[in-house]
């Protein structure tokens, strides 16, 4: 079955939205395969966000992702990779549609990095790569 990596970013954990976000994943019919709360290291984040290295928001993004614990989740189900991205909504919470995690729960705080509550893998290749980074034992 298809698997994706979901991260509840530090803003989501800090605001007490972890349960609400997991609830939406389960309510949609996806299965939680693994869940872990951890403090991400610079090495892990540099690998995870390798495609963004050199962009203006890269260092603020890594700093933000280390500002508190991250909840890493492997969610499983038919079509879960695009399905979770639909649940998450557009990258910018101001533009994200109501009904989505970012649209309902996020806002643009005018910070150097978009604090948009969640990450979800964008392709099967990304999902495989990211799951092995965050859950090496899986
Ligand atoms: P994610 O990969 O986290 O699900 P995404 O696919 O919507 O989000 P990406 O383009 O992969 O967005 O960017 C990764 C993250 O970097 C975003 O979720 C956001 O936190 C931050 N980000 C992306 N673009 C910008 C930007 N132009 N300015 C500030 N932060 C940004």
Image (cartoon, rainbow, N blue to C red):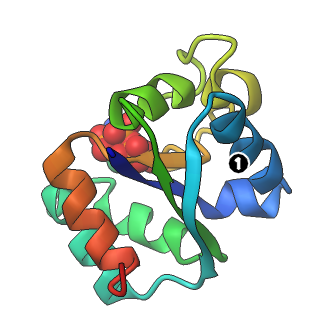
Residue drawn at (69%, 14%), measured in percent from left and top? 99
Name the spot of residue 30 as percent of width and height, x first: 56, 39
**Which residue is nearer to you in this view: 122 or 75?**
75
When the figure is inspected, residue 127 is found, relative to residue 116, above or below; the finding is below
In this rendered view, identify the residue nearer to me: 108 or 15: 15
Quadrant in the rendering for residue 20: top right
The residue shown at (83%, 55%) is 15
Q: Residue at x 47, y 22 (%)?
A: 86
In what quadrant does ligand 1 lie?
top left
**Residue 91 location (% of width, % of height):** 44, 31
Report the number of discs.
Answer: 1
- Residue in front for this viewpoint, 122 or 138: 138
Q: Is residue 19 above or below residue 50?
A: above
Q: Residues within 10 Å of mark 1 (few under 14, many from 20)?
A: some
Left/right placement of residue 49 relative to residue 26 reads: left
Determine the secondary structure under disc 1: helix
Q: Please, is residue 122 above or below residue 71 in the view?
A: above
Residue position marked by numbered label 1 in the rendering: 22
């Amino acid at each position: 079955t298809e698997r994706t990596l979901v991260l509840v970013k530090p803003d989501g954990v800090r605001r007490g939205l972890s349960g609400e976000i997991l609830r939406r994943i389960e309510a949609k019919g996806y299965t939680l395969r693994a869940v872990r709360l951890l403090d991400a290291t610079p090495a892990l984040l540099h690998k995870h966000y390798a495609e963004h290295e050199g962009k203006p928001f890269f260092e603020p993004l890594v700093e933000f992702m280390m500002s508190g614990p991250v909840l890493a989740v492997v969610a499983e189900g038919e079509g879960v990779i695009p399905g979770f991205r639909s649940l998450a909504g557009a990258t910018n919470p101001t533009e994200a549609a109501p009904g989505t995690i970012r649209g309902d729960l996020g806002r643009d705080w005018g910070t150097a990095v978009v604090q948009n509550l969640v990450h979800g893998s964008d392709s099967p290749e990304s999902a495989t790569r990211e799951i092995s980074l965050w859950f090496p034992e899986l």
